[in-house]
Amino acid sequence: MAEDHRVPWFPAWGIRFPETLDDPQFVISTFNEWRPSERWLLISFSAAASEVHLWTVWHALRRRELRNSMIGNSVDTEFLRLISGTHQIRTAFERAGLSKGDKTAWIVYLPEFGGENPFISEEETTLEIPRESFNDSTQEAERLMLHLKANLVAQRPIPTSAGLQRLGHEIDMDNSGPLELESAFLLHAAMADMSS
């Protein structure tokens, strides 16, 4: 990763399944059996728009977690809810979870660092995301890929109009550029506690 990148890579690894998913629940059950904690989850490939998007949703999750104000009963469920831009857990799983016909997904790890404002350490007043978050978790992600018989996709998250539609965004963004799409993903996630 380049040092001049806007933010470090989020601990997320794109994966391709050996076959198009016919039974997503089987894959999810296998993943849940082998994951080290509820801080690991699978999300649909199109649900992740960018590093900024993932870190922003994580930040909202971490603040809710530290304040004991999560709607979901676990951090993985709350992350799905926030990234889906909905107040309803069931809708979150439908939007950002795996679905029949998916060929790809993201393995996501939700780091636990930080206090009330997770990006600012107690010693400093500057905003900083630990650059080692991705690398420190890669070995575990690779182990989970083996259990899923999945291959790594050599791509980082990019915002797409199809991804926004899958998350329930209702405004047509087909002719939008990457920055407008990323902004729409961020706004959609921010609406999680305002929509029903």
Image (cartoon, helix red, strand yellow):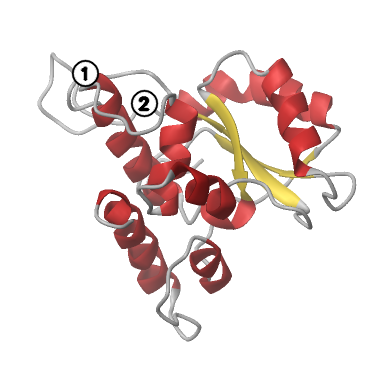
Q: Residues within 10 Å of mark 2 (few under 14, many from 20)?
A: few
Q: Tell whether 186 sits left or right of 38.
A: left
Which quadrant of the figure has residue 13? Answer: top right
Q: Residues within 10 Å of mark 1 (few under 14, many from 20)?
A: few
Pointer 2 residue: 130
Residue 71 in view (yes/no): yes
Instruction: Please tell me whether mark 2 sits on a helix, a strand or a loop.
Output: loop
Q: Nearer the viewer, residue 154 or 30?
A: 30
Location of residue 40 in the rendering, given as x and y in whole percent from the top left corner: 56, 25
Asked if residue 167 is positioned above or below residue 138 in the image, the reply reads below
Q: Tell whether 98 sits left or right of 195.
A: right
Which quadrant of the figure has residue 32? Answer: top right
Amino acid at pointer 2: Pro
Asked if residue 107 is positioned above or below residue 82 in the image, the reply reads above
Task: Name the residue at 21% across, 18% down.
Answer: 115
Q: Nearer the viewer, residue 162 or 33?
A: 33
Dot label at residue 115: 1
Location of residue 180 in the rendering, given as x and y in whole percent from the top left corner: 36, 73
Location of residue 30 in the rendering, given as x and y in whole percent from the top left corner: 77, 25
Instruction: Please tell me whether mark 1 sits on a helix, a strand or a loop.
Output: loop
